[in-house]
Amino acid sequence: MRLVASPGFVTACAVLLAVCLHPALPIAPPPAVTAALALLLVVGLFAGARRAGGRIVGLGALAVAAALGYDGLRGHHGTLTLEAGSGTNRYEEEGPDGQPLGLRPLGFDLVAEKIEPGGAVLLRSGADARLVVGRGRSASQGGLRIGLADTVPGAEPSVLRISVAGPQGSRLVDVAANAPATVDGLEIGLERYFPDFALDAKQQPYSRSNEPRNPAALLGVRRGSASWRVFVIRAMPGIHKPEGLDRVLSLTEVVPREVVTLRVSREPAAALALGGLLLMAAGAALEARPA
Amino acid sequence: MSLVAAAAALALAAASVLAEIGSVHGRAPALAGRGLAVASALLLVATGRPAAWPAAVLAVAAALVAPRSLPYLVAGAAAVVVALRPPSSSGPGITPLIAALALALAAAAFQRSAEERAAGRPGAPGAAMLGGAALVLSLALLDGGNVLRWQFGVGAGASRVELPGASLVLGVALLVTLAGTLGTSVHFLAAPAPTSQALSLGRRLLVLGAGLAGLGVAVTGAQVSQGGEGALAAGALDLAALALAAGLLVLGVLRMLADERPLARSESASTAGADTKPVLALAAAAALLAAATAGFEGWRGEGTYATDAVARAGTAALLGLGALPATRLGLARIALFTVALLALLAGAV
């Protein structure tokens, strides 16, 4: 017990736990190691406390450790992806390391009514419950907290509107990654997309940014056994006319897909963790008083 | 570039030097330094940029709660970032403000603890050695260690701006400061005598290194400013880190030169005699509060408290707890806590 109560023990546990928790650590330590260090720190804080402030810090640390442990065992995390107008009643649950655990029921229906360009999403749950989530704003529903995920794939403009000009006039088709379009017997697929097209020093194409400032694409076009690769760029319609292809393809527009990815979390002990941290802060502040 | 924030950064650097002079020559320079720091905080608020608030909190906390040269210097580095980054309408939130308060207190506790240790080892240029080590480390790490290859630039990809003139000055500063730090370290580790040739040479090289580092910061700032808004934004953190490290060395050299005079010892010892623990305990309390607000902001904004920001704030808070107990490696533990808070703030602004 003398070892556990020693200042060096508390220091070692706190520093090791800090290292384990830091997101820059290349390899995440096993949860059992982190939990063991947290418990040892709590025991050390209680055993080594000489004044009221130290005991309050220990009490707060106990509350935080209990909250994190409870949420680790009983909490849930996951994501769900919705298109504007679509709905779901389940989400893809993730484990502690982000590994997929399968679909889990939300316990209610969730419909994305509107997706704003800035990322704000108007959600409807049931008949009259309306929620708004966005950057820095999440909402609660049915014991779950719903927020915008860090990465919003739906915000990327990924549908290209292609004009196909031929003897009978022009037609417009939408082409997206893994979603080829068929028009006039031609199957048009997207091979590469450059939102902000440029050529590097070796004359190789690349994209300067993810913003569609100078969109261009390489399309794979097939008709029966014949196939062509056609380069289209919005700034220069119809620039590339491959031999044997009797159509002129041009990129006319980049249409943003209205899809959003939401993060879903159930953390029933969040309030206890917050209270524990505040208690620890109060205890540390009390330690500042002269003995 | 915000000229008002740049003026605040310069004023905070001056406040830092005044606080250092005040620790030797009495209250007047120290009071002038406090006034400059408060004026800098007002200037930072006057920029109208929410990103300037953490730097303003740092300056106010340094002036009112922890009036020492190191907190002023850290506040100056934060003001450099504000000056170089383009304005943003979104605020940084509450967490960086509380982290800034914790950082000012932790930096003051670190400096106080270092002074208490130095008081027991007269003639030892500990602060200059520490500043030299910080400068060598930052130069070796900045831009992926390119200074070691006589290259330096800011940004990445197509927006990268190479700074050939700055790389030359910084490379020479690195070599000279490394030699000076090693020279003084050799004396510490090997010579029982109060003075030695290694110490004498090391001191001179550290003075030269401080001058070259200051020149390097100026040349880098001038070259980056010619690269346009993109280069300024990309190089903001690098330039701030460089300015902080160079400032640490300059302050250390000032202290080293002051310690050569017999007057300095007794007066500087009297200011360093106060206990470190209350300031450190308050810094740890503020870091714990920052972790709590990060958790609340994550829960409210992203729907969960299991975010990277909370993990970083929690790490800093735990290192604060680890720095509190009276046991071995006290100075190293406070330094670790201060660096963690610095990293937390740098990631948040």
Image (cartoon, grey):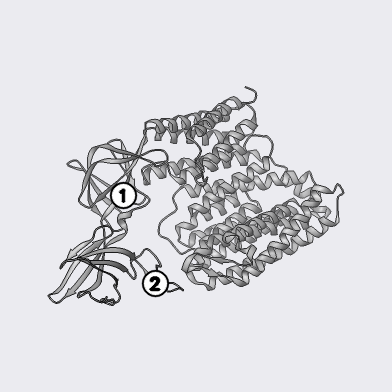
Q: Amino acid at mark 2?
A: Ala
In which chain is the residue bearing label 1? A
Query: B70 or B294: nearer the eye?
Result: B294
Residue A248 at x, y percent in the picture: 22, 75
**SS state under label 1:** strand
Report the residue at 83% width, 58% height from top: B200
N-term-proximal mark, 1 vs 2? 2
Q: Is residue B123 left or right of residue B324?
A: right
Say which residue label 2 marks: A198
Say which residue label 1 marks: A261
Q: Amino acid at mark 1?
A: Thr
How many numbered marks does the figure carry? 2
Sort mark 2 into few (<14), some (14-19) or many (20+) by Cα contacts within 10 Å. some
Residue B98 at x, y percent in the picture: 51, 46
Sort mark 1 into few (<14), some (14-19) or many (20+) by Cα contacts within 10 Å. many
In the rendered view, tell whether residue B20 sits above or below residue A202: above
Report the residue at 55% width, 41% height from top: A19
In which chain is the residue bearing label 2? A
User: Do the dots labelled 1 and 2 sit on one chain?
Assistant: yes
Q: Quadrant of residue B273?
A: top right
Q: Quadrant of residue A95?
A: top left
Residue, far front: A225
Residue B126 at x, y percent in the picture: 74, 50
Q: Is residue B26 left or right of residue B348?
A: right
Query: A114 or A101: nearer the eye?
Result: A101
Q: Is residue B255 left or right of residue A6?
A: right
In the rendered view, tell whether residue A106 sits above or below residue B309: above
Query: B347 or A72: nearer the eye?
Result: A72
